[in-house]
Amino acid sequence: MTTYDVPRHPATASVTAVGARGHETSTSGSAAGARLGWLRIVVGILSRTVLGTLVGLLLWAAVPAVIGWTPTTVMTGSMEPRIHPGDVVVARPVAESSIHRGQVLLFQDPDRADHLRLHRYDDNGQGTQIVTKGDANQAADSTPIDRSAVVGVGYLRVPYIGTPFVWAAGHQWGHLLVTGSALMLLVLGAQADRSLRRELKGEGRGEGGAASAPEDATGTSSATGTSGASTAPSGLVLASVAAASAAVDPASRRGLRLADRRERRLRRLRGAAGTLAVAGLVGGLALTLVVSGGAGAAFSSQVTSTSTFASSAAYDCLMPAVTDSPVFAYGYNEAAGASTADSSATRRAGTLSGGVTRVAGACGSSPFVTLNGTSGQVTTNAPAVAAPTAFTVESWINLPANSAGGKIIGFGNQASGQSGQYDRQLWASGTGLITFGTYNGGTKTVSTTKTYRDGAWHHVAGTVTAAGVMTLYVDGAVVGTQTNALGEPTTGYWRVGYDNLAGWPNIPASSANYFFGGSLDDTAAYTTALSAATIAQHVKNGR
């Protein structure tokens, strides 16, 4: 048998040495590459988060225009400290009857055509006019506005997003240049990890196909087992291949380990990139909400005195403009004292008797009065007036579970004590039923079948039209109607919390309980029969 002595190939040793050196270089490069990859991912995601937040704020400011709301950029500091130059304020349309004192209004500027102004409703002017004022201004605006000039009521504030418009109007080009450069850096930063993301995606999809089997030092493919030296006998070739493979094997193993480490690093980067991307998205959304959050506070009433109710005569936001022509309207918003202001045009102040207790509040929770059911009442400081033919009486009431009822509001021919003629009245029975009635040779009434002694606030209202149609409302819903219900012609006074009820149905058990036992707020009377829609709006407006 002929044998062939195959010498060790000189390249074998060099392959092993190079493989070892390659391992050291690759390990060092792998660590540096990993750190660079992390840095690129963090820079890219942070940049995209900031850009996404800016885009979110822009959409937050612009999208409401699709539904007819009006975004506007605040250009001056007249509404500081709550609304700043550069803020974008979105105003929502509102019915003229819903506009009230303390609201931030966007309206046609009376002093500059084709301009809008954003100021707060400060006071009532002549007729239906509105006097406005900037929160930062010492004096009210010199020109009142008509209600028809109001575009909307401030509803949403997106802070500082319109600042570039303020800079452009003030020719502050340096500020715009710096801001533009910062945006360009953010755009470039958002692309910092672009190639890495492509690589990670490629690894995830397995791009490049399966790795080809390495050839050994003789050129033999370990996958196919074929050799480029076809002239050698097969036994000798196999022996040579085995010997060469054994010689190269340590370097091959190191190469495989390096490939495995690279794959694990890419998997870690891919997982981290996904986690950070989600965190960036959530962070951007949260930042958008935080930056624009609390915007409603900008539109709450600006109180020039201290913030506690006890130290303020009355909060402006609790003195709404009255647009339905009441003959009196008591909100009980004073800090103390026996007098309550009349917010109607007639300015007939009311007097609180002993047995009436004030309950403090603020803009978010209106003050009110509680009547003890034995001596508390409110009388109007006004001369006698003719009882109206068409009219409305209304009030918010709160009956505790132990209330004995009593008169809420009515008209009598005596300013105090028990009247001899009395009608056009709302009252509660000893069980909490609400009744509305008039008298003209006989009583005409409408009553609830449900008791309202539940310790909750309810809006009650009664109307009579010029044609004599009577309607009782509770919480804006019609309870019942009655015809031929015109009241008796008489002269007298509006009474709150007490007057005679003798001879009427569903009255308290004794005359002592004609005094109302419970709480009242926003009590008013009108010389017109308010519509169902108007009463529903009063309910919606709240106390």
Image (spheres, helix red, strand yellow):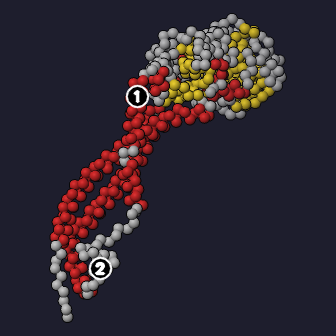
Residue 2 % position (x, y): 19, 92
Q: Residue furthest top?
A: 383
Please tell me whether mark 2 sits on a helix, a strand or a loop: loop
- Residue at 54%, 26% (x, y): give it: 72
Q: Is residue 515 visible to us here? A: no
Q: Amino acid at mark 2?
A: Ser
* Residue nearest the observer in this picture, 248 or 522: 248
Could you tell me which quadrant the N terminus lies in? Answer: bottom left
Marker disc for residue 481 = none
Q: Is residue 285 above or below residue 391?
A: below
Query: Which residue, as the protein is rendered here, is positioned at the far bottom?
Result: 1
Disc 1 secondary structure class: helix
Q: Nearer the viewer, mark 2 or mark 1?
A: 2
- Residue 27 lies, with reference to residue 477, above or below; the image says below
Location of mark 2 (residue):
227
Residue located at (59% from left, 16% from top): 109
Inspect this view and state whether residue 58 appears: yes
Q: Vertically, is 294 above or below 341?
A: below
- Which mark is on residue 177? 1
In the image shown, does 231 or 304 lie closer to the viewer? 231
Q: Tell me where residue 163 appears, x and y as whole percent.
A: 46, 26
Q: Is residue 518 above or below residue 184?
A: above
The one of 350 and 403 positioned closer to us in this rendering: 350
